[in-house]
Image (spheres, rainbow, N blue to C red):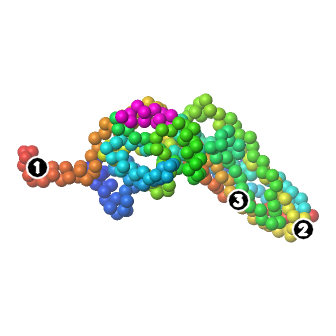
């Protein structure tokens, strides 16, 4: 079933160009992005290949987002050594200085990126905040969570992302094709 | 109150027929009740009440939210000579706590609320009908998440009646 879904996804991707998330995102490659941080440097998701990424869409005007931020700080401290990277994507229209002041006040210790319509669109038109994507070390989406969760639920998602063994779709397809060849069938019999 | 009935019938009827929705699938709604006939005499003013209804399960910040980072509800009307605008009066927000921050009080509107605006008519205004346009800007949340700020159009007609 997963292979069929991945196949459909590849078709859609070829037709429509860059990868965009929609529908069931489990095991789908997370779209890469190139966003500015609050200090003006640029960050790509692909910079963190080999790490599990907690990608949190938030805004200063979102009180539930504010609740999660200290938890993300703790989780970054606790699981950073195991390969977790927390990235916040601020979806505010306000200036970076205001976002920076807010993040500083909240004690944020992880990179805050300045979101835009493109990244929102690529991640399935993120409208509901907070929305968090849990991405594994291969860059595959393990889960998407919309709305505020409990700290325990968030930590479970982090652990899933750190332990995930989703393979990139191309690799899965190669394995499936190899398994379907006559030689492979003979070997199996 | 009856002017809400038609709107309510349209908005609420499907609610009982739909399965439970996942977070983010239901969009917040704020609608304005139709404005009746607004009349004003040249050189006089009139107090206009605009009635709004927020969709169930949602709340929006009041005009005076309790923190700088929150986005207030604001009514903006564009003057249309000979009609100009006086004070806009917002209702006080209701101090409420939500599951996402039980120790924090937010000043919000939920359900129905009304904003009053003073309309002034120039002394030498020509009798006739003048359209007024504007928008209500708000930012809505539900019990666990928030939606980006939005605006809905506000428009009605003002009739200048000879003295």
Q: Secondary structure at mark 2?
A: loop
Q: Is residue A138 magenta?
A: no
Please say whether residue A185 is visible from this viewpoint. Answer: yes
Other residues around mark 2 within 10 Å, as few (<14) / some (14–19) / many (≥20): few
- The reply to whether label 1 and label 2 mark residues of one chain is no
Mark 1 and mark 2: span between their CA atoms? 93 Å
Chain hosting mark 2: B
Q: Nearer the viewer, residue A22 or B71?
A: B71
- The reply to whether label 1 and label 3 mark residues of one chain is no
Residue A23: x, y in percent? 40, 50
Q: Is there a contact, CB below 8 Å, between mark 3 and mark 2?
A: no
Q: Residue furthest bottom?
A: B126
Q: Which residue is mark 2?
A: B124
Which mark, by number, is residue A167? Answer: none
The span shown in magenta is A68-81
Q: Secondary structure at mark 1?
A: helix
Q: Secondary structure at mark 3?
A: strand
Is A148 displayed left or right of B155 in the figure? Answer: left
Q: Which residue is mark 1?
A: A184
Q: Which residue is mark 3?
A: B134
């Amino acid at each position: 079933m997963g292979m069929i879904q991945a196949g459909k996804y590849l078709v859609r991707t070829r037709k429509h160009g860059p990868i965009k998330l929609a529908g069931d995102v489990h095991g789908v490659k997370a779209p890469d992005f190139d966003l500015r941080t609050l200090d003006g440097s640029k960050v790509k998701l692909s910079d963190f290949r080999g790490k599990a990424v907690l990608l949190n869409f938030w805004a200063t005007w979102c009180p539930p987002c504010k609740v999660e931020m200290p938890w993300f700080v703790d989780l970054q401290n606790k699981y950073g050594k195991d390969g977790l990277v927390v990235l916040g994507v601020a979806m505010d229209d306000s200036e970076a200085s205001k976002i920076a002041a807010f993040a500083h006040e909240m004690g944020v210790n992880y990179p805050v990126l300045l979101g835009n319509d493109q990244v929102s669109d690529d991640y399935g038109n993120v409208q509901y905040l907070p929305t968090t994507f849990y991405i594994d070390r291969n860059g595959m989406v393990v889960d998407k969570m919309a709305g505020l969760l409990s700290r325990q639920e968030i930590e479970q998602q982090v652990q899933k992302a750190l332990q995930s063994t989703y393979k990139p779709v191309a690799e899965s397809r190669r394995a499936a094709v190899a398994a379907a060849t006559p030689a492979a069938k003979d070997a199996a019999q | 109150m009856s002017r809400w009935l038609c709107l309510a019938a349209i908005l609420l009827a499907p609610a009982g027929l739909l399965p439970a929705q996942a977070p983010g699938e239901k969009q917040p709604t704020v609608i304005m009740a139709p404005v009746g006939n607004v009349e004003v005499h040249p050189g006089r003013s009139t107090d206009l009440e605009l009635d709004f209804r927020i969709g169930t399960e949602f709340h929006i910040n009041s005009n005076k939210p309790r923190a700088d980072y929150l986005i207030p509800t604001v009514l903006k009307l564009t003057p249309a000579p000979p009609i100009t605008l006086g004070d806009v009066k917002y209702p006080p927000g209701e101090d409420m706590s939500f599951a996402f921050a039980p120790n924090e009080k937010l000043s919000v509107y939920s359900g129905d609320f009304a904003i009053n605006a003073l309309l002034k008519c120039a002394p030498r205004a020509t009798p006739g009908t003048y359209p007024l346009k504007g928008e209500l800007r708000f930012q809505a949340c539900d019990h666990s998440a928030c939606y980006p700020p939005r605006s809905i159009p506000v428009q009605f007609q003002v009739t200048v009646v000879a003295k």
